[in-house]
Image (cartoon, rainbow, N blue to C red):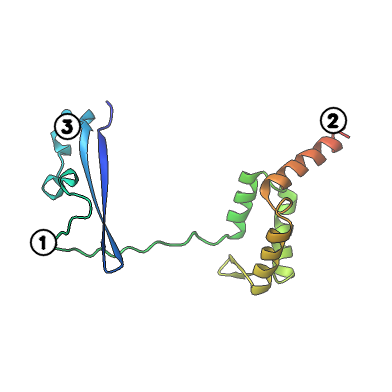
Amino acid sequence: MSPAKYRKQIMRFENEGHKFYAFTREIVFDGFKKVYSSYENEDAEKLIDIEAIKKAKVLKAASAEVAHHETKPPARFTQATLVGELEKSGVGRPSTYSTMANVAIDRGYATLVNRAFFPTEQGRHVAQILEKDFPEVINKEFTRNMEQHLDNIAHGSEL
């Protein structure tokens, strides 16, 4: 059975340079909710009729609720997750994965803390310069294509 479909609306409020958002949604297609009564909308009394609010209208808040939300940065690469990302990107060969990671550490571009790679100041600086001055070379697509080209030469299918 098909899932329910909703029309979502977002309203933005501004007050003294701060931005606030209100969200509401209405069902446009019942889907499985038509059959399963246990999936009734428990938040129906909280929904706002955004259509009734005019743009630039001054509103008074009847109540306010503060919700704290923090995002987490992506996890640092470990040797295993780095190898997985290289494989997924089609960059490198299994025989070179460990060497690539070791070179980054040996040359002072990264350090290992609790098995996770952290770039050093030198590593950040080198990466920044390379990405700025050689963007056509310092990217996964170039590396993947070059490795394919070299494989073709090794197999005699390309000169």
Pointer 3 or 2: first along the chain? 3
In the rendered structure, find residue 36 and report the number of the disc placed on it: 3
**Location of residue 14 (image quadrant):** bottom left
**In the rendered view, would you say 155 is above or below 46?**
above
Check contact, mark 3 vs mark 1: CB within 8 A: no
Pointer 3 or 1: first along the chain? 3
Q: Amino acid at mark 2?
A: Ser
Q: Secondary structure at mark 3?
A: loop
Q: Amino acid at mark 1?
A: Ala
Mark 3 and mark 1: span between their CA atoms?
34 Å
Q: Which residue is mark 2?
A: 157
Q: Secondary structure at mark 1?
A: loop
Residue at 68 percent of width and 59 percent of height = 131
Q: Where the C terminus falls, by quadrant? A: top right
Viewer-proximal residue, 123 or 115? Answer: 123
Viewer-proximal residue, 75 or 42? Answer: 42
Q: Amino acid at mark 3?
A: Tyr
Looking at the rendered image, the disc whose residue lies closer to the viewer, 3 or 1, is 1
Circle 1 residues within 10 Å: few <14, some 14–19, many ≥20:
few
Viewer-proximal residue, 66 or 40? Answer: 66
Q: Is 99 left or right of 10, judged from the image as shown?
A: right
Q: Is 149 left or right of 76, judged from the image as shown?
A: right
Residue 83, given in percent of the width and then of the height, sits at 63, 52
Residue 20, given in percent of the width and then of the height, sits at 27, 60
